[in-house]
Amino acid sequence: MKKILSILSLVAVMGLAASPVSYAEETVTETITVQETVSTDAAPAAEAPAAAEAAPAAEAAPAPTLDVGNTAFMIVATVLVILMTIPGLALFYGGLVRQKNMLSVLMQVFVVFSMISVLWAAYGYSMAFSEGNMIVGGLSKAFLAGITPASLSGTIPEYVFLTFQLTFAAITPGLIVGGFAERMKFSAVLLFTALWVTFAYIPIAHMVWGGGYLAELGAKDFAGGTVVHINAGIAALIGAIMLGKRIGYGKEAMPPHNLVMTMIGASLLWVGWFGFNVGSELAADGIAGMVLINTQLATGSAVLGWIFAEWLFRGKPSMLGAASGAVAGLVAITPACGFIGPMGSIILGFTASFISLWGVTKLKGALGYDDSLDVFGVHGLAGIWGAVGTGVLMSPGLGGVGYAEGVTMGGQVSTQIIAVVVTLIWTGIVSVILYKVVDAVVGLRVSEEYEREGLDTTEHGERAYSL
């Protein structure tokens, strides 16, 4: 427990060493973005003309109408996020583990994605995006009550919006799987995931995107830096520590069993990430175009940064390094993509690759934890840098969209840091508690015999390859 608390403290200090963010909806576009409230019966008072302050807000705001183009755009974006999860994330992770655990990782990602889809419809969407308090929403839309084909969220059907958000909720715990890969019981994975999405993901999503505390504070997270990547990164780190190292870790070689598969998975992640980021604009407009180029440039520059660092410090650039750099760049640009300019995205991606490479080598080695697939080193650290860097690079002088009226770079950076720290502390504490609960109920780790034989046969009775 002391080791966990010390690492949480270190992470919090790292967050405080960075800089905060600002709320860009006021300066970017009139179309609805992820950060806005999805309730269709609550029109922002700010939309009412100043000359009609006495008139009811409902009369001042035009009734929302369906936009066919935006709807088609969002359906495609949603499908792209599904692509980046299954098969993208599954293949990326599957290639990185040893052959005897290949199917177990595929199974975990595949079934976690399926289970959270159902839980999202049952209560997740309502608790994240319906009216509630500053931490969590209510149950007014539990089991999708009151939502019909005619229900709109801005200019798109609410069914489309909630499905798009479903994919975010479902991929996030899939990312966590990489932290404890090759040693956690399948039953424990499912129980932990259901509890974690309920008590960690949903509150953070509501606080950032559902009109909760961090949204009111002015934190900027366009597509999931805090909600997805920092959230998953710290949960994976806690899990890696609490389960302990894999048998033979540090003594036996544990190379990826299929880097070709990892490269295919990374490529699918890159393609699908455009749905993740560009879709978060919720409209096919100019901002979506800016997000498109920002995502591409940040990822490309991160690939170059990672292999350049490997070339410089190790003598050879690797395919695994290029794939890892791509993911680091994608993670870093996620919170920033709708707020910064193309040149800023190159800077953000390039620097993120160095930070993540340091995390998966020096930091991991110094602290001695076994984060199997480097979820914290890539998603956690690049997510922190992306969130904080947003506050700096959204400055108009650096090509960004600018800050809300009265907000300075320092103020926005401070807000971003608060959002990072809140996410780290909330999810860190919740994760510790939930791992302990799951351990008490079903046990976290497989037996030594099962681990040595491999989870494919001991947990699922199958083999990935019949050679």
Image: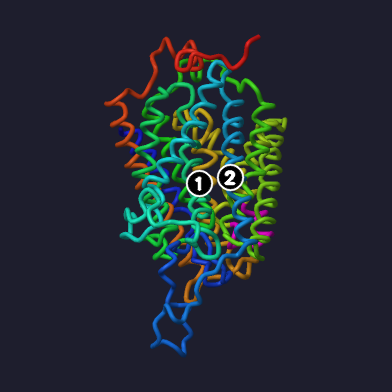
> 58 left or right of 456?
left
> 387 left or right of 79?
left
> 348 left or right of 365?
right
Mark 2 crowdedness (10 Å alpha carbons): few <14, some 14-19, many ≥20? many
Query: Which amino acid is tagged 1?
Result: Phe
Residue 122 vertical placement versus 93 (above, below)? below
Residue highlighted by disc 2: 81
Residue 168's disc is 1
Mark 1 crowdedness (10 Å alpha carbons): few <14, some 14-19, many ≥20? many
Residue 229 vertical placement versus 156 (above, below)? above
Among numbered discs 2 and 1, the one appearing first in the sequence: 2
What is the quadrant of the C terminus in the image?
A: top right
Q: Which residues are magenta?
A: 337-348
* Residue 186 appears in the picture as rendered: yes
- Label 2: element kind: helix
Task: Tell me which colouring the rendered structure shows.
Answer: rainbow
* Residue 417 appears in the picture as rendered: no
Decide which of 62, 209 is in the foreground and name it.
62
Residue that appears at 62% across and 62% down: 68
Residue 246 image point, x, y percent: 46, 20
